[in-house]
Amino acid sequence: MKHYFFICLIGLLTPSGMLNAQDEPQVDEQPQLLRYKFSPGETISAEVSHRAITETTINGTTQHIETATDSIKSWKITDVDQDGLATLEHLVDHVKMMTRTSGVESVRWDSDSQEAPPEGYEGVQLGLGKPLSELTIDSCGRIIKRKNFFPTPPSNTGDLMVVPLPDSPVTTGTSWAVPDTIIIELPGGARKSVRTRLRYQVTKLEDDRASIKVDTTVLTPIHDTQTESRLLERIWSGQIIFDIDRGCVIERSVRVDRRVVGFHGPASSIRYKASREEQLISTSSQLK
């Protein structure tokens, strides 16, 4: 649990991949081009709320862990070149955390307080208000270059930092897919690569906003419950609202609710239930 909160704050960039759009055009619907639009000196901030419950049962004993994290993250656009490549810094400006474990007193911390962070949260405090990473992306969200200033393990819910957009204009029903590879650690230190695919589909185009659903498919055959249990936090689905005129994501939500039985003997089970909500903080001075 020591690194859990830092993980859910910083997230992991979705690798760039094939953005092949498949259209299911609607009658009389005008195709729309989805593109990020950034300006030098612009700051884009969002409120992020993450909730998670993990229930683990082994040999008749159940442990219940509940976590809650509320944070404000920002993108500071430091440069946009003549080709439209934007360089941005990713920061977390504020965080409020809670963890509750069965049989143990709850632990809480607010970065605005004068209290020192509890054990396990020290790394979060060190990174607050500082660039966690520097990214260069194109207008479709492809990652051209990335430099990490702090460790960036995979996020527990929603492996999205930059939502990838398709090359071609979209209509309701348009879909595109992005391949990904997840590296999981198994007991004993072994590591395993698991191929996945993120599939995006436009569900509605209305008032310069595109509603996009996303889900994850595991492509690598999984034949053992140990591996399956390590994938619980990485197989998710969600909804994205993209503002076409502003050229940015304004809302994002992710859900996970999965259970694996028999991962540590026939009487064992583990359930992971989580949500992540992101809402853009909009001011006239920040966004065009």
Image (cartoon, rainbow, N blue to C red):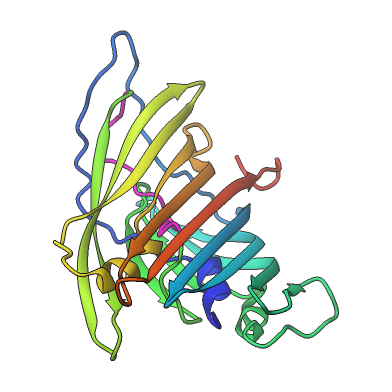
Residue at left offset 37%, top offset 52%: 141
Residue 4 point in image, percent of width and height: 53, 75
Give the farthest residue toward the top.
28
Q: Is residue 130 visible?
A: yes
Front residue (pair 162, 224) = 224
Q: How many marks?
A: 0
Q: In the drawing, does residue 284 fall left or right of residue 143?
A: right
Residue at left offset 38%, top offset 38%: 213
Residue 166 colored in magenta in the image: yes
Give the farthest residue toward the right.
114
Quadrant (top left, top right, bottom left, bottom right) of the N terminus: bottom right
Note whether 198 is above or below 91 in the view shown. Answer: above
Residue 108 point in image, percent of width and height: 74, 73
Query: Which of the 4 image quadrants contains residue 102?
Result: bottom right
Residue 282 point in image, percent of width and height: 67, 43
Quadrant (top left, top right, bottom left, bottom right) of the C terminus: top right
Residue at left offset 68%, top offset 66%: 93
Front residue (pair 34, 193) = 193
Q: Is residue 76 visible?
A: no
Q: In the drawing, does residue 46 fall left or right of residue 197?
A: right
Query: Which of the 4 image quadrants contains residue 188?
Result: bottom left
Residue 280 point in image, percent of width and height: 61, 46
Query: Which of the 4 image quadrants contains residue 186?
Result: bottom left
Q: Main secondary structure of the magenta part?
A: loop
Front residue (pair 68, 150) = 68
Residue at left offset 44%, top offset 30%: 210
Q: In the drawing, does residue 9 fall left or right of residue 282?
A: left
Note whether 99 is above or below 258 in the view shown. Answer: below
The magenta segment: 157-171
Residue 120 colored in magenta in the image: no
Q: In the drawing, does residue 94 fall left or right of residue 85?
A: right
